[in-house]
């Protein structure tokens, strides 16, 4: 069961019947559109196979260390020498390069197959992301297959672009909004001195099911976010109530990023060397992170805060257990699955009759998989599934497995 199977529990907008294309996760930062009948797999890279098995699409993304001005000259420098070397190695060119300011492509005759190449790129803060598409097809050269690849390549969308469009619409509706942080599908913004974190996972899930409704989906989520924020701004002096506090599990990288933000006073506590818990203030349509000054206003000690947050998790979030073929899957609301690591009563052999110590994988906040330390094949399976989820999720946590020790709790598994 992959990460987006959990999202199926939530209400989404169905795709139109005539829309034969479906949007797939290419990595944790990008998606593409493919015909829904193509068979998609994730092993060490993204691959898709045509229904007749005669065409295979492989996609890889890599990062250059320096930003560049992405235009036709950029793609010429990037690929023309490669195309020439390809030809010298015995691949016969079948067309002239297609070059624009957004992409480059060319087709070759290989041994018993036609190879259609397509390359695009995008500037990120710390370098250029280059995405290479290779469509290998049996039979003769077909310009329609080349055009098909170009269509797929041009459907590439980075989640940062989706978030950017959300931010643009958000600030257009209220120019007093300040954006403080954007990463993946997480947007932090302030209005009247109150900071809110908006997670766009559900919005993007709707968009993946109905790509033609982009503006409609974004407008709806922007309106909901601003409406809830304006209500919060009118109550800016309100102290969070105990019932609003819920625990969220984060990784070391998140905490390190948090510590680099000047003036950040977000509370967090360690679970082990890799995992930490922060405390979310649950609002009407979004939640933000509890700060040290707010905790003082609540007149709670740090230990009382932990107790209150876990009690709220138990009382407010429904949880279920799903038995898969070789492991267990804990299923909640898509936000707080990993948080159930904090409830000792959950982690018993009565609940999880596994061989050896209980072992968990928490690749994202919405996926918690369980097996036993003596179940070798299941351990291997959890590692493979974690790798897949880490490549396809935005709220990633850890690629490590954690073993439950009686006196230490969950520790990194050796």
Image: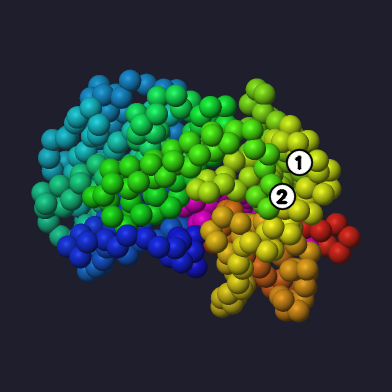
Residue at 20%, 46% in the rendered image: 151
Q: Are marks 1 and 2 in contact (CB under 8 Å)?
A: yes
Mark 2 crowd level (few <14, some 14–19, many ≥20, 10 Å Cα): some
Q: Residue furthest right?
A: 407
Q: Residues within 10 Å of mark 1 (few under 14, many from 20)?
A: some
Residue 408 horizontal/vertical position (percent): 85, 57
Q: Nearer the viewer, residue 241 or 96?
A: 241
Q: Residue 98's x, y, as percent?
A: 16, 35
Image check: 297 left or right of 378? right
- Judge by depth and name the residue closer to the eye, 12 or 385: 12
Which percent across, then down, holds residue 354? 72, 76
The residue lying at 40 percent from left, 24 percent from top is 175
**Residue 173 — which label?**
none
What separation in Å lies between label 1 and label 2 (alpha carbons)?
A: 8 Å
- Is residue 387 or residue 270 the one in the foreground? 270
On screen, residue 381 above or below 156: below
Which mark identifies residue 298? 1
**Residue 156 as seen in the image, left or right of residue 333:** left
- Magenta span of residues: 387-404
Q: How many marks?
A: 2
Q: Is residue 167 left or right of residue 80?
A: right
Q: Secondary structure at mark 1?
A: helix
Q: In the picture, residue 335 is in which quadrant?
A: bottom right
**Can you say whether 5 is above or below 97 in the image?**
below
Q: Secondary structure at mark 2?
A: helix
Question: In which quadrant will I find the C terminus?
Answer: bottom right
Q: Is residue 312 visible?
A: yes
Q: Nearer the viewer, residue 154 or 183?
A: 183
- The first of marks 1 and 2 along the sequence is 2
The image's colouring method is rainbow
Residue 242, label in figure: 2
Residue 130 appears anywhere in the view: no
């Amino acid at each position: 069961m992959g990460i987006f199977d959990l999202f199926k529990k939530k209400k989404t907008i169905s795709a139109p019947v005539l829309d034969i294309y479906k949007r797939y996760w290419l990595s944790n930062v990008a998606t593409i559109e493919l015909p829904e009948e193509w068979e998609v797999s994730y092993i060490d890279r993204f691959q898709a196979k045509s229904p007749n098995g005669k065409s295979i699409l492989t996609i890889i993304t890599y990062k250059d260390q320096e930003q560049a001005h992405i235009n036709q000259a950029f793609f010429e420098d990037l690929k023309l020498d490669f195309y020439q070397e390809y030809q010298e190695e015995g691949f016969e060119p079948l067309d002239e390069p297609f070059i624009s300011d957004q992409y480059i492509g060319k087709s070759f005759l290989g041994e018993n197959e036609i190879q259609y190449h397509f390359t695009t790129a995008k500037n990120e803060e710390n370098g250029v992301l280059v995405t290479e598409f290779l469509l290998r097809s049996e039979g003769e050269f077909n310009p329609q297959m080349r055009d098909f690849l170009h269509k797929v390549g041009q459907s590439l969308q980075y989640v940062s672009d989706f978030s950017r469009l959300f931010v643009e619409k958000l600030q257009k509706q209220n120019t007093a909004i300040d954006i403080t942080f954007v990463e993946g599908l997480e947007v932090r913004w302030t209005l009247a001195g109150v900071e809110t974190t908006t997670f766009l996972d559900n919005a993007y899930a709707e968009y993946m099911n109905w790509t033609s409704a982009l503006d409609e989906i974004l407008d709806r989520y922007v309106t909901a976010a601003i409406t809830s924020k304006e209500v919060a701004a009118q109550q800016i002096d309100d102290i969070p109530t105990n019932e609003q506090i819920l625990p969220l599990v984060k990784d070391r990288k998140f905490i390190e990023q948090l510590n680099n933000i000047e003036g950040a006073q977000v509370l967090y506590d360690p679970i082990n060397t890799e995992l930490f818990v922060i405390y979310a203030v649950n609002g009407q349509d979004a939640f933000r992170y509890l700060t040290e000054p707010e905790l003082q206003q609540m007149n709670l000690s740090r230990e009382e805060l932990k107790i209150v947050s876990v009690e709220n998790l138990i009382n407010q979030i429904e949880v279920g257990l799903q038995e898969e073929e070789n492991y267990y899957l804990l299923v909640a609301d898509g936000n707080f699955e990993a948080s159930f690591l904090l409830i000792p009563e959950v982690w018993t052999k009565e609940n999880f009759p596994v061989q050896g110590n209980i072992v968990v994988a928490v690749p994202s906040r919405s996926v918690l998989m369980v097996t036993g330390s003596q179940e070798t094949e299941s351990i291997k399976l959890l590692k493979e599934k974690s790798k897949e989820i880490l490549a396809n999720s935005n709220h990633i946590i850890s690629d490590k497995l954690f073993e439950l020790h009686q006196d230490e709790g969950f520790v990194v598994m050796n």
